Image (cartoon, rainbow, N blue to C red):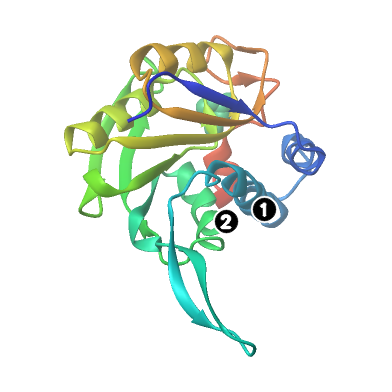
Amino acid sequence: MYESNEVFINDHPLIKHKITRLRDQSTGTSEFRSLVGEISMLMGYEALRDLPVEDIEVQTPIETCKSPIISGRKLAIVPILRAGLGMVDGILALVPNAKVGHIGIYRDEITHLPHEYYCKLPSPIEERVIVVTDPMLATGGSAVDAISQIKSHGGMKIKFMCIIAAPEGLKKLQKSHPDIQIYIGCLDRVLNKDAYICPGLGDAGDRIFGTK
Ligand code: URA
């Protein structure tokens, strides 16, 4: 369990560049999807910096030595459906043995309140480092709900990863879950009256999956 929120806001030029390409309304579905994957992989590299490692014995062509490995068994990626799915493959490229859970939450278009309709998590969830993904942290409602659900199943070591966050959502997430780590690609200016992030990139799910 983390003692108090650690918030990591990306400052890497490669991620900044790719986020600019994501924002551009003329970026098409295929490029958008690839960019989300690449950004997730780059952010995942940083977010997994503190994964526990254990030494194994390995025979090199020269001699035997002890050398560290990561136990993929200990990692769970939990995308918030549906846009969070777009971030999974990028992280799996780094840790192919990670298990993947799913949480389904949709946002009521009138009230903007989150409603949960699906939750399936890999066990033993209490022993895993859990990376919850959602490209957009807008009001924070879905992220707060998803993390409460994971905690109610026993999850403890939780990292939340988003590509773009609104200050309102970040504040809500920090207040509701002060014990998680939060990774943000870019902290944007504000939410508009329809709960879209400004300047943002529009509807991340629609842009990843080519729906409208
Ligand atoms: N979800 C999105 O996909 N985009 C926003 O701007 C806010 C929530």
Q: Quadrant of ligand 1?
A: top right
User: Dot 1 surroundings within 10 Å: few (below 14), some, or many (20 or more)?
Assistant: many
Q: Residue at x 50, y 80 (%)?
A: 58
Of 7 and 208, the residue lying toward us: 7
In this picture, residue 87 sits left or right of residue 128: right
Residue 116 appears in the rendering: yes
Which residue was labeled with disc 2?
Answer: 90
In this picture, residue 190 sits left or right of residue 51: right
Mark before the other along the chain sequence, 2 or 1: 1
Contact flag, marks 2 and 1 (Cβ < 8 Å): yes
Which image quarter is the N terminus in?
top left
Q: Residue at x 67, y 53 (%)?
A: 38
Q: How many marks?
A: 2
Of 184 and 57, the residue lying toward us: 57
Which residue was labeled with disc 1?
Answer: 38
Q: Locate residue 13, reporting x and y percent.
A: 82, 38
Which image quarter is the C terminus in?
top right
Q: Is 60 drawn above or below residue 191 in the view shown?
A: below
Secondary structure of the residue carrying numbered label 1? helix
User: Dot 2 surroundings within 10 Å: few (below 14), some, or many (20 or more)?
Assistant: many
Q: Amino acid at mark 2?
A: Gly
Q: Locate residue 19, reporting x and y percent.
A: 73, 38
Q: Is 91 drawn above or below residue 172 in the view shown?
A: below
